[in-house]
Image: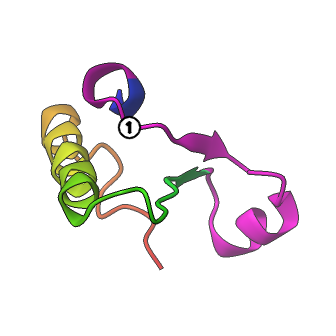
């Protein structure tokens, strides 16, 4: 959804770090990379997009799996 609807490129899964991801969570992770060519505005829009998606889908698994 981030890529198709908002133009935000990201990766999900174990990201070539399965032992670490498995140690930190029981699920996969999402990675969004920023760099010097991203403006603060663009980074802010990523968080706004994530909030919109979260609201549209509902919090399907309780409070999430944040650490």
Residue at x 38% of width, y 37% of height? 8
- Residue drawn at (49%, 53%), measured in percent from left and top? 32
Q: Quadrant of residue 13?
A: top right
Magenta residues (range): 4-28
Residue 40 location (% of width, % of height):
23, 65
Q: Nearer the viewer, residue 38 or 17?
A: 38
Residue 47 falls within the magenta-colored stretch:
no
State the residue position of label 1. 8
Q: Residue at x 45, y 65 (%)?
A: 36
Between 15 and 46, the one lying in front of the other is 46
SS at mark 1 in the image: loop
Q: Is residue 54 left or right of residue 9?
A: left
Q: On the picture, is 11 further left or further right than 52?
A: right
Residue 65 to residue 11: above or below: below
Residue 30: % across, % down: 53, 51
Nearer to the camera, 36 or 7: 36
User: Viewed as shown, does residue 31 lie left or right of 38?
Assistant: right
Tell me which residue sits at (59%, 41%) in the image. Answer: 11
């Amino acid at each position: 959804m981030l890529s198709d609807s908002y133009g935000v490129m990201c990766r999900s899964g174990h990201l070539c770090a399965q032992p670490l991801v498995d140690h930190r969570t029981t699920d996969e992770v999402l990675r969004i990379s920023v760099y010097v060519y991203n403006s603060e505005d663009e980074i802010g829009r990523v968080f706004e997009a994530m909030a919109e998606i979260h609201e549209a889908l509902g919090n399907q698994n309780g409070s999430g799996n944040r650490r």
